[in-house]
Amino acid sequence: MPLYTRVTDHAYNSPVLVICLEGWIDAGLGAGTAIGAIMGQRPTERDALWDADELIDHRARRPVLHLADGVATGLTWPEIELRATTDEDGRDVVLLVGPEPDMRWHAFCASVVQLAIDLQVRMVVGLGAFPAPVPHTRPVRIVSTAPTSAVASRVGFIAGSIDVPAGVQAALEHSFNNAGIEAVGLWARVPHYVVSMPYPAASAALIDGLAAVAGLSLSSHDLQESAVRSRVRIDELIRNSDEHQAMVAQLEGQMDSEVSASREADQMTMASGEEIAAELERFLRGDGSA
């Protein structure tokens, strides 16, 4: 039996599929806030729902019990769903949202690919954010992951080789590539010292990156305004510590040098693989702090 059920028979015109599943790395809530902003800009409609009992460990992701004066009024269960919307110019966009599956990844990926084929998806874009040795005083840079170098080069990438734990988004990218559907992951680099707080600048950069790579009309205006307010708060925190000021100044010098080098090489070579690995390991251990 299929893992999902379609709840509408709506047909789309070469939609873009955007993937943002909860449970893997999302520094500064960059990807989650971005997908929330996209869903908040225009009405969305549920298109498909996956069988949570087949994919989710409910002891790890328990449903929420709603209590009112001691009365259990109901439960809200974690759900993986596909929602449909349009961009500002009416282009079709479908959004895969909800928790990352706890099990049956191979079957899940196969089901998502089959649905994408049925809907005639033209491109798949995953969103994410990870901690990096970069300063909050510089624009957020986006790097990519993709099954082919041609796709990765269109956005930019971190040069060198590195082995890191993978989320289901990586498995989906390869599954789509095997099915002949272009897929790319967009990752915002979030200053490692603010990963435990919302960082709207990363979310705005992801929306702008998605719009650029997929040819969509999406607004990041509200997030840009939130980013300005966030910058003021972070500046105040940094200003109270000579050590933090020195750290930011060092990161600024490093990033400015790397940006200059990347322009010459036409690559986003923003940091060494060892530095990225160290920040990811700290983040996964829960050592990251603002």
Image (tube, rainbow, N blue to C red):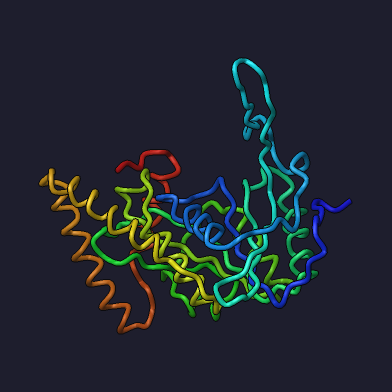
Q: How many marks?
A: 0
* Residue 288 placement (x, y as % from top left): 35, 42
* Residue 272 placement (x, y as % from top left): 35, 63
> Farthest residue in the left direction?
242
Q: Is residue 9 left or right of residue 71?
A: right
Q: Quadrant of residue 277?
A: bottom left
> Farthest residue in the top direction?
70
Q: Residue at x 89, y 51 (%)?
A: 1
| Quadrant occupied by the C terminus | top left
Looking at the image, which is closer to me, 101 or 163?
A: 101
Q: Residue at x 63, y 68 (%)?
A: 93
Q: Is residue 79 left or right of residue 142?
A: right
* Residue 132 placement (x, y as % from top left): 35, 56
161 vs 279: above or below: below
Q: Is residue 187 left or right of residue 101?
A: left
Q: Residue at x 71, y 55 (%)?
A: 46
Q: Is residue 114 left or right of residue 190?
A: right
Q: Residue at x 74, y 67 (%)?
A: 116
Looking at the image, which is closer to me, 71 or 244?
A: 71
83 vs 208: above or below: above
* Residue 57 placement (x, y as % from top left): 69, 36
Q: Quadrant of residue 118?
A: bottom right
